[in-house]
Amino acid sequence: MSDWGIGHDRIILSGMQFIGYHGTRPEENRLGQRFVVDVAVELDLRAAGASDDLSQTVDYSQIHDRAREIVCGPALQLTEAVAERIATAVLTDHPQICTVAVRVTKPGVRLGDTILAGSVVEIVRRR
């Protein structure tokens, strides 16, 4: 998420943590688990920087609220679907955003007798 190239303005929300009930295993849907979400949005921030006016940028508390609504909302099977819903909502809610990158991490994933540090899905969507 950090290497989008030179010349792009970004707002990055890093490490948002929520409890969700997503997954393909019944225990994931029943017990829930922690999800860590990072969202980076690309838009022109010159007017906001010059004016110091919130109306000239994106209020990132709204992006946080949408991510929370989706992660804490109805259960989905795939982390990919969680990420896709967040990206779609951000682009729909904020027409001034030209690109959104969403990373959804499930920390401490168990696969049989192995525990992974986590599984990560990262998507980038452009207008």
Image: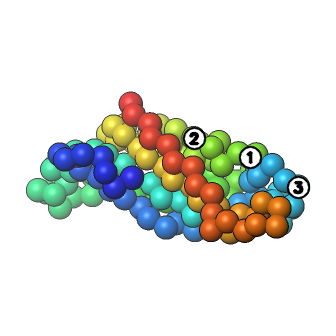
Image coordinates of residue 9 in percent, x first then y, are: 23, 50
Distance from label 3 to label 2 (Cα)?
22 Å
Say whether residue 6 is visible: yes
Distance Cα–Cα, label 3 vs label 1: 12 Å
Earlier in the chain: of badge 3 and badge 1, it is 3
Residue shown at 84% from the left, 53% from the top: 25
Horizontal side, residue 70 vs residue 5: left or right: right
Which quadrant would residue 84 be assigned to in this image? top right
Q: Is label 3 in contact with label 2 (beta carbons under 8 Å)?
A: no
Q: Sequence-wise, which precedes: disc 3 or disc 2?
A: 3
Instruction: From the viewer's perspective, tell me whether residue 44 is left or right of residue 37.
Output: left
Residue at the extreme top of the image, as rendered? 127
Label 2 Cα neighbours within 10 Å, binned few <14 / some 14-19 / many ≥20: many
> What secondary structure is found at the residue carrying circle 3?
helix
Tell me the distance, in whole angstroms, between the alpha carbons under discs 2 and 1: 11 Å
Residue type beneath disc 1: Leu
Colour scheme shown: rainbow
Question: Label 3 belongs to which residue?
Answer: 26
In the rendered image, which residue does mark 1 sit on? 76
Q: Going 76% across and 45% down the picture, which residue do you hit? A: 77
Amino acid type assigned to the residue bearing label 3 in the image: Pro
Q: Earlier in the sequence, mark 2 or mark 1?
A: 1
**Residue 1 locus on image (x, y percent):** 39, 52
Per the image, the residue denoted by label 2 is 84
Q: Is residue 93 visible?
A: no
* In front of the other: 123 or 72: 123
